[in-house]
Image (spheres, rainbow, N blue to C red):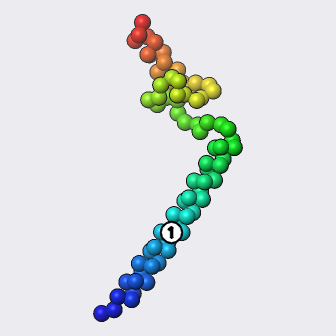
Amino acid sequence: MSLQPLGILLGDIMTYFLITFVVMLIVIAIMAIGVIFGRRAIKGSCGGGMSKAECVCVEKCEKRKKMEAEAHLSQG
């Protein structure tokens, strides 16, 4: 019984893993460079569980407006 085929198989798997890992690192680096030089905040939902200070939206979405109105009514 030879372990040679098993060694080749593990080598191929490791090669694919390393190639995939390097490609993902390159993609992440490109995205980081885009954010750094774009100077814009990454857009997301303002209607989530964030506090008012953390919302980076220029214009508030309907969900955020509704959430703030309900909070204002419950406070006073």
The residue at which mark 1 appears reads as: 18
Left or right: residue 61 versus residue 39 is left
Q: What element carries label 1?
A: helix
Above or below, 21 against 51 in this view is below
- Image location of residue 46, percent across then percent down: 52, 29
Residue 44 placement (x, y as % from top left): 55, 36
> In the picture, which quadrant includes the C terminus?
top left
Instruction: Residue at 30%, 93% (x, y): give it.
Output: 1
**Residue shown at the point (44%, 16%) measured from the top left:** 70
The kind of residue tagged 1 is Leu
Task: Tell me: 17 left or right of 34.
Answer: left
Q: Which residue is drawn at 64% across and 44% down?
A: 35
As drawn, which residue projects farthest toward the bottom?
Answer: 1
Please give left or right for residue 15 compared with residue 7 in the image. Answer: right
Whether residue 63 is visible: no
Q: Picture quarter containing residue 55?
A: top right
Image height of 50 relative to 37, above or below? above
Residue 3 visible within the image: yes
The picture places residue 62, in percent across and down from the top left corner, at: 54, 24
Label 1: few (<14), some (14–19) or many (≥20) C-alpha neighbours in 10 Å = few
Give the residue at the far top of this rendering: 76
Vertical order, 29 against 17 (above or below): above
